[in-house]
């Protein structure tokens, strides 16, 4: 079995606040409290109106090349591992040469797509609506992507990849931010995020948390049930009072944090060594730690979790649109989507991919077919001033405020 290998880190979510606000000015879309949310909702539940851009009407011959912006691990050509290559087979099958620009952050992806030099991008939820609202990407004609029919329904027409019921991308994969602990130290087995927020924690100095302003949403998610009087309905839609409550909780948590992490390799090593015994993780980190015989377990806590879902989007003025569409169909074909999922470490988007994984238990491990599981995942999105939960009587805090708050929290 091939060991899964994720990108070096999930996208850094330190956004250029001005860009984010300009991109979504007048827009309210972005978040859903569950995986079952509808199209991007604006103030009062209405959906925002993106720039008028037409989707490709019909598929023609390939233009000979396609220029991609992608996360590391999403467009492997055998250079990292000769056995991991879905780019060259694509080139042979379509005649479209693949030119890939690896991006390290969502901000970088947005800026690259605005240059007009790229045809498609594998955008995460914190970037996708900015790309739509800025006119950088076009609606996608799913009739031209035959494999779209086999994408899990739980990933279609969601707040991070559609507006007004119009799809703006093809789902690639998804994952949850989980709670992990060392079973030789943490007892009893936790079932709540409360274990990482307990100021009297017996694990003080050995608790870990994700190092990003978006982690404020994890605190907000916990407060949704721990302090219902705050009225938090969406962890990405926080007014000033709600944000302050999350900040206060995170400042309290900092006293028991041993280290924050954003590099998965450091998180793996810390759990293996026992320097960390409990905290936020990804399934692939747990797999790697367990593969080295360290005693860890994971759970999706009773409060639910935050998470992420990536989407392949086509540039509004793509120079090679036919090759871009061919790539979209290729990357979510059962065989290739299975390869990507296993190499990267995420649940595939194509339901038929589960039959093609080399590890026959892979989709069970990543809960790929478990929509009840993913209904508890609150996917990353960008907080904006117009409350994503539909409130119109208050102003919500935007990501620039979250970024300042995170700096304050960490000191």
Image (cartoon, rainbow, N blue to C red):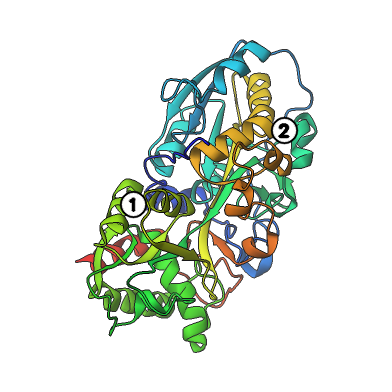
Q: Is residue 366 left or right of residue 257?
A: right
Instruction: In the displayed orientation, state which residue is furthest to the left.
Output: 411
Q: In this view, does 136 lie to the left or right of 210?
A: right
In the image, residue 268 above or below residue 119:
below
Instruction: Name the residue nearer the viewer: 248 or 191.
Output: 191
Q: Is residue 153 visible?
A: yes
Q: In this view, does 269 lie to the left or right of 21?
A: left
Depth-wise, is mark 1 or mark 2 nearer the camera?
A: 1
What secondary structure is marked by label 2? loop
* x 54%, y 53%: residue: 175
Q: Distance of mark 1 from mark 2, alpha carbons?
A: 43 Å
Q: Name the residue under label 2.
A: 55
**Image quadrant in which you'd find residue 358:** top right
* x 51%, y 25%: residue: 84
Residue 395 location (% of width, % of height): 48, 72
Instruction: Name the residue nearer the viewer: 136 or 179.
Output: 179
In the image, residue 130 above or below residue 32:
above
- Binning the other alpha carbons within 10 Å of mark 1 as few (below 14), some (14 to 19) or many (20 upward) gives many
**Image quadrant in which you'd find residue 46:** bottom right
What secondary structure is marked by label 1? helix
Residue 292 location (% of width, % of height): 37, 49
Instruction: Name the residue nearer the viewer: 308 or 343.
Output: 343
In the image, residue 305 above or below residue 189:
above
Number of dots carrying numbers: 2
Q: Can residue 397 be seen in this view?
A: no
Residue 217 location (% of width, % of height): 44, 67
Residue 75 location (% of width, % of height): 51, 28
- Binning the other alpha carbons within 10 Å of mark 2 as few (below 14), some (14 to 19) or many (20 upward) gives some
* x 46%, y 36%: residue: 71
Q: Which mark is residue 283?
A: none
Q: Mark 1 points at which residue?
A: 268
């Amino acid at each position: 079995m091939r060991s899964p290998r994720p990108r070096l880190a999930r996208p850094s979510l330190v956004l250029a606040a001005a860009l984010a606000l300009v991109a979504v000015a007048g827009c309210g879309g972005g978040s859903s409290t569950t995986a079952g949310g509808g199209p991007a909702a604006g103030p009062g539940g209405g959906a925002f109106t993106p720039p008028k851009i037409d989707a490709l009407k019909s598929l023609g011959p390939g233009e000979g090349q396609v220029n991609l912006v992608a996360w590391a691990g999403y467009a492997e050509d055998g250079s990292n591992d000769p056995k991991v290559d879905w780019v060259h087979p694509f080139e042979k099958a379509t005649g479209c040469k693949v030119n890939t620009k690896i991006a390290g952050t969502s901000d970088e992806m947005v800026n690259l797509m605005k240059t007009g030099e790229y045809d498609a991008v594998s955008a995460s939820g914190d970037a996708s609506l900015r790309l739509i609202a800025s006119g950088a990407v076009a609606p996608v004609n799913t009739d031209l992507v035959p494999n779209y029919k086999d994408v899990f329904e739980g990933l279609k027409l969601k707040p991070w990849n559609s507006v007004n019921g119009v799809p703006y991308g093809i789902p690639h994969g998804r994952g949850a931010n989980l709670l992990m602990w060392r079973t030789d130290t943490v007892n009893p087995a936790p079932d709540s995020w409360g274990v990482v927020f307990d100021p009297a924690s017996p694990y003080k100095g050995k608790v870990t948390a994700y190092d990003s302003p978006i982690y404020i949403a994890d605190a907000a998610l916990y407060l949704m049930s721990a302090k219902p009087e705050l009225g938090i309905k969406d962890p990405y839609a926080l007014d000033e009072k709600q944000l302050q409550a999350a900040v206060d909780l995170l400042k309290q948590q900092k006293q028991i944090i041993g280290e924050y992490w954003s590099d998965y390799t450091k998180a793996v090593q810390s759990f293996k060594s026992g320097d960390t015994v409990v905290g936020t993780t990804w399934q692939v980190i747990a797999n790697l730690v367990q593969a080295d015989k360290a005693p860890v377990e994971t759970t999706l806590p009773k409060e639910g979790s935050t998470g992420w879902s990536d989407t392949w989007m086509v540039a509004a003025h793509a120079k090679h649109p036919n090759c871009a569409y061919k790539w979209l169909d290729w990357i979510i074909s059962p065989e290739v989507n299975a390869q990507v999922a296993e190499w990267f470490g995420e649940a595939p988007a194509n339901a038929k991919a589960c039959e093609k994984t080399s590890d026959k238990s892979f989709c069970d491990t990543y809960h790929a077919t478990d929509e009840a599981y993913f209904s508890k995942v609150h996917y990353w999105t960008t907080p904006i001033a117009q409350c994503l939960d539909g409130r119109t009587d208050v102003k919500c805090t935007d990501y620039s405020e979250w970024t300042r708050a995170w700096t304050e929290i960490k000191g």
